[in-house]
Image (tube, grey):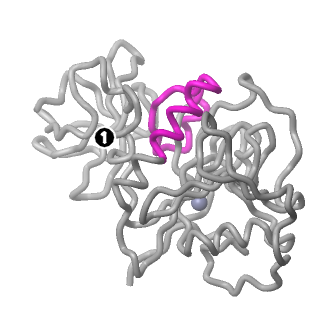
Amino acid sequence: MRSNGCKQANTPESGRPLGRRRGIARGDQTSALAAEEPGDRWVAADSSNYSWADRGVNDINWIVVHTTVGSYSGAISWFQNPDANVSAHYVIRNSDGHTTKMVDESNVAWHASGFNSSAIGIEHEWTESQGYISDTMYQQSAALIDYLADTYDIPRNYYTSMSAPCNASGGIIEHRHAPTNSYCSSSNATACPGPDWSGSRLMDFVGDGGGGGDGKFEMDQTVYTTANLNAREQPGTDSTIVATMPEGSAGRIMNGPESADGYTWWGLHFEADNIWGWCAEPWLEV
Ligand SMILES: [Zn+2]
């Protein structure tokens, strides 16, 4: 049995019946978006499912990526349901990348506990029966992320560590790594995004993305450790050691480069052991 992605109570991801629907959206809740806006249409989430705010460029620093574990239409319906108490700013359809905006970026959607106030949430349709994430959806998501990164001055770096928001000024982070407090000492208890999600594939399509464009290695490149090498939770020699990888371990570049403690650091996914960590460049080679 495969593990599920997002598992918050009362989300469309949970597979619970959607319950009472609110009926047809009011006329002012649904519209086509103007051409220059990202997304294909606007369908308002119920106003009880997000917090009104007046956020601007300085308040929005992170993009949280999710998968729905449920259909595109089901997610949209759920965010319209006043019983849901969850929402996301955008929902994207797997088959064709069709995008629905549901909460204005100035407002705080409820998608990553403890982390919502500085974040924009993007839900990507995924169901177990689909069992894949389409390149079309990655491309549409990347185009949206490019727009948001430009508009809100969000760095195009992809993070898979809950301490990232305490060490970086902003970026893209997976729901499961979104910290639940300002100390970055615990993260959202969820498997979201789900098993078919690839952050590196997403970043393939994000403009000059991945944070790997300027350094020795490229995003998604496979590199090997030239010694028994510590993989750390964050860049830096004082960061917690996630694992010590044997010499010759293969890792995929997922993040970086970052400078800390006199070294250049790369965020790696050691896929054979499903270990994520930051390693120092001098002991990595192609
Ligand atoms: Zn999620």
**Does label 1 point to a residue whose CB lies under 8 Å from ligand 1?**
no
In percent of width and height, residue 131 lies at: 36, 74
**Position of 199 compared to 225: left or right?**
right
Magenta residues? Answer: 141-170
> What residue sits 23% from the left and 45% below the top?
245
- Left or right side of 93 for 241: left
Give the quarter the ligand 1 occupies.
bottom right
Q: Which residue is mark 1?
A: 268
Give residue 55's quadrant in the image.
top right
Q: Quarter of the image containing the C terminus?
A: top left
- Identify the residue at the far top of this view: 262
Instruction: Give yes or no for residue 164 being in the magenta stretch.
Output: yes
Res. 252 image quadrant: top left
Q: Residue at x 39, y 17 (%)?
A: 259
Is residue 216 toward the left or the right of residue 184 in the image? left
- How many numbered circles does the render carry? 1
Above or below, 256 against 101 in this view is above
Look at label 1 and name its amino acid. Leu
How far across and down, in percent of the image, does residue 230 sit? 29, 37
265 above or below 20? above
